[in-house]
Image (cartoon, helix red, strand yellow):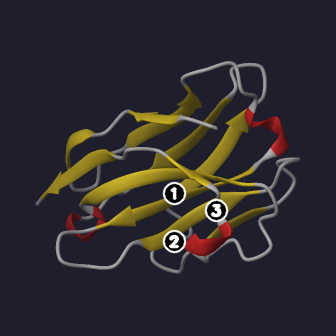
Amino acid sequence: QVQLVETGGGLVQAGGSLRLSCTTSGRTTLRVYGMGWFRQAPGKEREFVAAVTRSGGSTYYSDAVRGRFAITRDYAMNTVYLLMNSVKPEDTADYYCAASQALDHYADKDSYDYWGQGTQVTVSS
């Protein structure tokens, strides 16, 4: 069982930046997993934000965040990051980290095997 832990959420003004982190609570390495970030706003479905392959060689983004957000992974720290720049009020949501053994369909939440509990991001206008 992989237990993912997200940190870094909070309140930020529109146009500002925030960095979310995702690691494990145990000794599991994230190296063997493709990793993704999803978000869920109140009353809405959980939606794909960004993903990175096991090797870190490929990254994917939703149209809503492409050019503003960046997903990276630090193997030494066993951590995956989501750097959020130029945030907008519509970025307000709970953000979830997820791990996938296959990452065949990176935007499909059903492709992910493990999920964190989420971290809340609020963007004020």
Q: What residue type is labelled 2?
A: Phe
Q: Give how far apart the Cα atoms at labels 3 and 1 are.
A: 20 Å
- Residue 19 visible: yes
Q: Residue at x 77, y 47 (%)?
A: 33
Residue occupied by mark 2: 48
Front of the two marks 3 and 2: 3
Q: What SS does tag 1 mark?
A: strand
Q: What element carries label 3?
A: loop
**Quarter of the figure that contains the C terminus:** bottom left
Residue 36 x %, y %? 61, 57
Name the amino acid type tagged 3. Tyr
On screen, residue 58 above or below 107: above
Identity of the amino acid at label 1? Answer: Phe
Residue 85 visible? The answer is no
Left or right, 20 with reference to 63: left
Could you say where residue 124 lies in the image, as x and y percent from the top left? 12, 55
Residue labelled with disc 1? 69
Looking at the image, is mark 1 or mark 2 nearer the viewer?
2
